């Protein structure tokens, strides 16, 4: 429930509003957990190809695992109110969906490699953190993310964690 509130705040608010409507229309007061289930259905409807609720839950778990890796690596808390954090979470949602769906959207080309080489030097901590994520995803989910995704992870990690 906490992860749903944290990663899908707008959908969770809609789920809570749904509970209010149900109570007003029927007199039945449902538990707050039901707002989370409503939120998951909304997230499911929002995704391309409408991944099922089980996949949304798996994607949510992947996001949490990645955030744990970033936290352990940086040893600092996220500013969950920042725009950089919001963008990072948004990126992680789509990243996790691609992992869950085993999408072959992870590519590499020469330009990505050149830019990644520059980022490796300029943002060494963020790069190493992103490499840890890449290795985790490969080991646990059997997905190779490619240089393009690694590049985006470096950028989002740098902005969310190290641009203070």
Image (tube, rainbow, N blue to C red):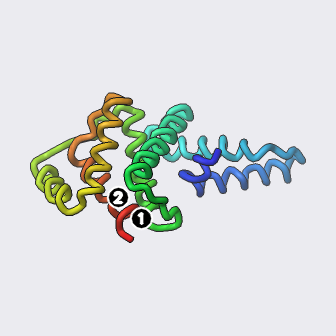
Of mark 1 and mark 2, the one earlier in the sequence is 1
The image's mark for residue 153 is: none
Q: Are marks 1 and 2 in contact (CB under 8 Å)?
A: yes
Image quadrant occupied by the N terminus: top right
Image quadrant occupied by the C terminus: bottom left
Q: How far from the left and from the top, in percent, is residue 85?
A: 45, 61
Q: How far from the left and from the top, in percent, is residue 61?
A: 50, 39
Residue at (30% x, 48% y) in the render: 130
Report the front residue among 133 and 10: 133
Is residue 33 visible in this depiction of the protein?
Answer: yes
Q: Secondary structure at mark 1?
A: helix
Of all residues shown, which one is farthest toward the front? 75
Q: In the rendered image, which residue does mark 2 sit on? A: 156
Tally the numbered discs.
2
Residue at (39% x, 55% y) in the render: 74
Distance from Cα at disc 1 to Cα at disc 2: 7 Å
Alpha-carbon neighbours of circle 1 within 10 Å: few (<14), some, or many (≥20)?
Answer: many
Q: In the rendered image, which residue does mark 1 sit on? A: 84
Relative side of 32 to 57, left or right: right
Residue at (54% x, 37% y) in the render: 57
Relative side of 79 to 40, left or right: left
Relative side of 22 to 163, left or right: right
Q: How far from the left and from the top, in percent, is residue 90?
A: 44, 54
Location of residue 83 by image quarter: bottom left
Is residue 93 visible in this depiction of the protein?
Answer: no
Report the front residue among 41 and 137: 137
Above-or-below relation of 123 to 60: below
């Amino acid at each position: 429930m906490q992860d749903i509130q944290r990663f899908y705040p707008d959908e969770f608010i809609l789920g809570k509003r749904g509970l209010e409507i149900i109570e007003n229309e029927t007199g039945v007061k449902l538990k707050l957990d039901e707002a989370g289930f409503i939120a998951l259905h909304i997230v499911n409807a929002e995704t391309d190809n409408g991944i099922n609720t089980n996949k949304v839950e798996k994607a949510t778990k992947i996001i949490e695992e990645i955030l744990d890796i970033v936290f352990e690596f940086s040893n600092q808390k996220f500013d969950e109110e920042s725009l950089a954090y919001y963008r990072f979470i948004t990126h992680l949602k789509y990243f996790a969906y691609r992992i869950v769906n085993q999408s072959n959207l992870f590519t590499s080309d020469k330009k990505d490699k050149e830019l990644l080489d520059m980022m490796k030097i300029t943002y060494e901590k963020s790069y190493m953190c992103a490499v840890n994520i890449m290795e985790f995803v490969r080991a646990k989910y059997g997905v190779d993310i490619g240089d393009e995704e690694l590049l985006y992870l470096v950028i989002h990690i740098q902005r969310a964690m190290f641009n203070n």
